Image: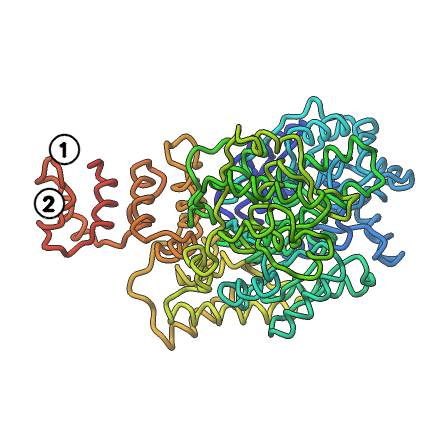
C-alpha cells in the first residue's frame, strides 16, 4: 500500500489529523476486520469507511436508508475527486446501467445503495461479479425493532456475512444505548466485530428546556434573539402543527418551509434541497425529516413538542453544529406533551411488552426535562457514560435551578384530584385550587369540595408546574381512557399521609434567563474588518455553489472560511495548510478565494498580527488522559476551531476570565501552545519570564507581585497563561 490513511486524509479531505478513534477504526477495516462504530453526529463517522474504501482494492458498498440524500452525499464526494455513485429509483434506466458498468469496470471507489435494492437477487448477482472493498452499514440502529427508525430490511443484512464472509463490514450509528448495541451485534452477526464507542458528548451544543406557556411566541423570541439569519430545524409532533408553525414564521419574516410525509415526494425533495442549499432556511418538520442530513452549519434544533425518547432527542438535536461551532438545542415542554405521547402509546396496536418499553423511554425523557442537575450529565448517563463535572453549557448550569419543599403543595394538588373524582385535567384542577367560581365548577359541585380555594399561595402557572412534576415523579398519572384526566398512583399514599417529603424544582423566571442566551455573532467574526471579509468569502462561496448546483458547505465549510479570515493565506501553498482544503478543492476553488482575500487586503490592508499557519500535517495530541476537566476540554475544542477567547466566552455563556483559566490549565497539560492563546513578542515574553523568576514560585500572591512589578502593563489572565507555560504552577 503506497499511501497511508493519513496521506488520504490530508490529500483528499484536507484535514491534518484524525480525531478520536478514527485511525484505529480505519486500520481495523483495512486489515479486513469487522467493526461496530458508535460516534456522535459530526464526529467523522463517514471517514471511517470512506478512507478504507479508497485504500482497499475494489469498491466500497455503502448501505444507507437515506435515498433522498444519496445525491448530496455523492456530490460532496465528487467535489473531493472521489469516484462515487448511487443506485436508486430516482435514476433513469440508462443511468442505472452506466453505474453498474462502472462498478464492474472498477471505476468506482464508493457506491451508495438502499437495503431494499441491495437484498434483491439481481443486485447480489451483480456484486458477485464485482470486486468489493468493504460493506458499510450506515444508520445501523435501524435494525432495532424497539427504535423509532426501525427498517425491516435491515434485519436481513446478515446475508452479507453469509454470501461474502471475506469482505469486512463496518456498522455505524450515532445513537444506540446498550440494548440497541446488543441488537445490532446479534441481528447483523457482528459477534466478532471490534466495537468502538466514542463519547456521546457534543460540547458545542447548548441544551435548553423551557416551560411551555406560549410555544410559538417563545420560539419566535428565541429565534429573533439568537438565530436571525441562521439555518435550523423546528420539530413538531403533527403535520398540522408543522404547517401552522411554518406559516407563522413566514409571517414573522423567516424563510421557513414545511416538511412532513403528507407532502408529495416532489415537494419534499424541493424543500429539502432548498434547506441544504440555503444559509438561513428554517425547516419545520415532523421526525420524517433529518436522518442523515449532512448539513454542517445547522445552528439550532428546536422542539415545539416532546420527542418520543431520549434517543430520539439526542439524534434530532445532534443535527445541530456538525461543524463543531456553537449551536443550540432548544425544547419547549409541558404536561400536555406527556399526555399526548401517553395517549399515542396506549392507543397504538403494538404488543404490551413494546408499550412498556416505550413508556419507560418516555419516563426517562421526562426525567431529563425535570432535571435540576447538569442536563448534559443526565443525558450522557442515559447512554452509560458518566460525567463528574457540570458542563457549563446547558440551562441548568448557566442558571442553576432552585428547589423547594413542595410537600404541602403536593398534598393539596393530589387531594384536589381525589376530591373531584380523579377524572379532570390540570386546567380544571387549578381553577378549583384557586377558587374560581365559574359555571363549569358549580355545575359539578366542585365549589363545595374541601380543596376549593385552598391554593391561592401559588399562581396558575406554578400549580401547573406542580402537577407536571408530580406526573414526572410517578405520584400522579394520566388516565388516557378517561380523556386525559389525572389520577393518583399508589406512590401518592405516603405523601398524602405525611410519611414522605417532596422536593420540587422552581421553574426559572422567564424574564431573567438572559445568562443562557448567546450573542448572534458567535459564528461571524466580531471585528468589523474581519466580518466584512467573512461576508465576502461567503458570497463567493454562494456563487460557486450555485454554478456547481451544490450546497455552499460542499464548496467549503464555515470552519474553513473562519480559518481563511484568521490566517489570511496569500498563495496556494499557504491555503492548502487550512482544514478542509484538499488537493482537488485547492485546484478547483483556490484561485477564487485567494482573489477575494487579495482584493480585501488591497482595500483594508493586512492585519499586523496574524497567527502562524498550521503545520501541513500536525498531529495534535488527543484530548484524553490529560487530567483536564470536561469544561476545560469543551473550551479547548472551541479554541481549536479558531474561535477567539471572546467568542468562546459568548458561545459558552461564561466570562472571558473563566476561558483564560481553562486555557491556562490546557497550556499546563501540554494540550495547547502559549502563542495560540496570547499574542506576545519575544521581548515581551522574556520580560514577563524574568519577572516570574524574581519571585518565589510558592510565595502567596505571586500573580499580583508580578503584575505590580510590571507596572500593570499585562492583565492577570495573560500572566496566568504565561505562568502555566513556564511551569510556575
The residue labelled by disc 2 is: 705
Give the image quarter of residue 472. top right
The x, y position of residue 20, in whole percent, is 51, 37
Label 2 element class: helix
Query: Is any part of residue 109 visible from this angle?
Result: no
Is the Cβ of the residue at disc 1 closer than 8 Å to that at disc 2? Answer: no
Give above or below for 576 relative to 8.
below
Viewer-side residue, 80 vs 495 = 495
What is the C-alpha distance between the residues marked 1 and 2? 12 Å
Give the image quarter of residue 194. top right
Residue at the image position 80 percent from the left and 45 percent from the top = 114
Q: Which class describes the residues within 10 Å of circle 1: few (<14), some (14-19), or many (20+)?
A: few
Q: Which class describes the residues within 10 Å of circle 2: few (<14), some (14-19), or many (20+)?
A: some
The residue labelled by disc 1 is: 698
Viewer-side residue, 20 vs 203 = 203
Viewer-side residue, 90 vs 327 = 327
Q: Residue furthest front?
A: 448
Residue at the image position 11 percent from the left and 52 percent from the top = 710
Residue at the image position 14 percent from the left and 33 percent from the top = 698
Q: Which image quarter is the N terminus in?
A: top right
Query: Is any part of residue 364 visible from this angle?
Result: yes
The x, y position of residue 134, in whole percent, is 72, 35
Q: Residue furthest bottom?
A: 603
Give above or below for 197 relative to 450.
above
Label 1 element class: loop
Amino acid at each position: 500500500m503506497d499511501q497511508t490513511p493519513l496521506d488520504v486524509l490530508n490529500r483528499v479531505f484536507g484535514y491534518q489529523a484524525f480525531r478520536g478513534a478514527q485511525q484505529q477504526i480505519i486500520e481495523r477495516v483495512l486489515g479486513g476486520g469487522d467493526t461496530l462504530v458508535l460516534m456522535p453526529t459530526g464526529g467523522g463517522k463517514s471517514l471511517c469507511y470512506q478512507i478504507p474504501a479508497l485504500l482497499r482494492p475494489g469498491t466500497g458498498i455503502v448501505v444507507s436508508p437515506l435515498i433522498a440524500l444519496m445525491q448530496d452525499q455523492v456530490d460532496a464526494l465528487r467535489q473531493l475527486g472521489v469516484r462515487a455513485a448511487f443506485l436508486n429509483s430516482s435514476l433513469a434506466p440508462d443511468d442505472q446501467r452506466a453505474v453498474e458498468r462502472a462498478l464492474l469496470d472498477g471505476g468506482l471507489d464508493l457506491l451508495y445503495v438502499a437495503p431494499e435494492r441491495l437484498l434483491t437477487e439481481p443486485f447480489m448477482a451483480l456484486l458477485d461479479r464485482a470486486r468489493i472493498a468493504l460493506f458499510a452499514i450506515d444508520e445501523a440502529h435501524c435494525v432495532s425493532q424497539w427504535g423509532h427508525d426501525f427498517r425491516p430490511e435491515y434485519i436481513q443484512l446478515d446475508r452479507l456475512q453469509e454470501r461474502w464472509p471475506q469482505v469486512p463490514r463496518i456498522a455505524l450509528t450515532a445513537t444506540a444505548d446498550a440494548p440497541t448495541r446488543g441488537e445490532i451485534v446479534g441481528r447483523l452477526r457482528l459477534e466478532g466485530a471490534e466495537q468502538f464507542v466514542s463519547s456521546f458528548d457534543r460540547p458545542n451544543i447548548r441544551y435548553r428546556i423551557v416551560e411551555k406557556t406560549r410555544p410559538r411566541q417563545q420560539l419566535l423570541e428565541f429565534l429573533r434573539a439568537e438565530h436571525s439569519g441562521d439555518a435550523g430545524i423546528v420539530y413538531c409532533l403533527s403535520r398540522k402543527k408543522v404547517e401552522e408553525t411554518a406559516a407563522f414564521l413566514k409571517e414573522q419574516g423567516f424563510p421557513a418551509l414545511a416538511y412532513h410525509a403528507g407532502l408529495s415526494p416532489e415537494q419534499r425533495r424541493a424543500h429539502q434541497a432548498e434547506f441544504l442549499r440555503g444559509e438561513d432556511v428554517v425547516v419545520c418538520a415532523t421526525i420524517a425529516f433529518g436522518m442523515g442530513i449532512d448539513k454542517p452549519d445547522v445552528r439550532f434544533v428546536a422542539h415545539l413538542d416532546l420527542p418520543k425518547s431520549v434517543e430520539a432527542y439526542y439524534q434530532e438535536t445532534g443535527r445541530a453544529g456538525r461543524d463543531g461551532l456553537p449551536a443550540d438545542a432548544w425544547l419547549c415542554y409541558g404536561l400536555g406533551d406527556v399526555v399526548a405521547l401517553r395517549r399515542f402509546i396506549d392507543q397504538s396496536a403494538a404488543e404490551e411488552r413494546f408499550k412498556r418499553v416505550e413508556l419507560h423511554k418516555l419516563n426517562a425523557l421526562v426525567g431529563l426535562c425535570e432535571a435540576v442537575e447538569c442536563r448534559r450529565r443526565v443525558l450522557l448517563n442515559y447512554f452509560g457514560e458518566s460525567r463528574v463535572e457540570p458542563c457549563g453549557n446547558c440551562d441548568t448550569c448557566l442558571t442553576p435551578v432552585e428547589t423547594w419543599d413542595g410537600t404541602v403543595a403536593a398534598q393539596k394538588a393530589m387531594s384536589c384530584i381525589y376530591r373531584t373524582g380523579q377524572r379532570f385535567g390540570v386546567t380544571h384542577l387549578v381553577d378549583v385550587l384557586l377558587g374560581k367560581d365559574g359555571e363549569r365548577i358549580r355545575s359539578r359541585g366542585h365549589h363545595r369540595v374541601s380543596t376549593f380555594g385552598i391554593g391561592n399561595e401559588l399562581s396558575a402557572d406554578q400549580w401547573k408546574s406542580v402537577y407536571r412534576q408530580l406526573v414526572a415523579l410517578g405520584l400522579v398519572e394520566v388516565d388516557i381512557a378517561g380523556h386525559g384526566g389525572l389520577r393518583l398512583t399508589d406512590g401518592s399514599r405516603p405523601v398524602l399521609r405525611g410519611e414522605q417529603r417532596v422536593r420540587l424544582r422552581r421553574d426559572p423566571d422567564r424574564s431573567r434567563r438572559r445568562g443562557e442566551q448567546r450573542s448572534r455573532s458567535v459564528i461571524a467574526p466580531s471585528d468589523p474588518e474581519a466580518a466584512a471579509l467573512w461576508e465576502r468569502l461567503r458570497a463567493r462561496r454562494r456563487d460557486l455553489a450555485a454554478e456547481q448546483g451544490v450546497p455552499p458547505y460542499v464548496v467549503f465549510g464555515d470552519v474553513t472560511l473562519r480559518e481563511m479570515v484568521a490566517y489570511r493565506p496569500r498563495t496556494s501553498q499557504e491555503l492548502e495548510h487550512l482544514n478542509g482544503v484538499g488537493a482537488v478543492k485547492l485546484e478547483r476553488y483556490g484561485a477564487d478565494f485567494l482573489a477575494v482575500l487579495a482584493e480585501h487586503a488591497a482595500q483594508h490592508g493586512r492585519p499586523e498580527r496574524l497567527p502562524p499557519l498550521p503545520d501541513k500535517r500536525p498531529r495534535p495530541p488527543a484530548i484524553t488522559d490529560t487530567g483536564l476537566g470536561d469544561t476545560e476540554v469543551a473550551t479547548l475544542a472551541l479554541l481549536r476551531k479558531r474561535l477567539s477567547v471572546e467568542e468562546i466566552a459568548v458561545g459558552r455563556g461564561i466570562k472571558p476570565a473563566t476561558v483564560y483559566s481553562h486555557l491556562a490549565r490546557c497550556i499546563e497539560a501540554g494540550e495547547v501552545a502559549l502563542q495560540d492563546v496570547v499574542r506576545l513578542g519575544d521581548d515581551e515574553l522574556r520580560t514577563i519570564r524574568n519577572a516570574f523568576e524574581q519571585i518565589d514560585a510558592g510565595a502567596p500572591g505571586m500573580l499580583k507581585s508580578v503584575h505590580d512589578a510590571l507596572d500593570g502593563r499585562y492583565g492577570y489572565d495573560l500572566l496566568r497563561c504565561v505562568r502555566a507555560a513556564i511551569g510556575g504552577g
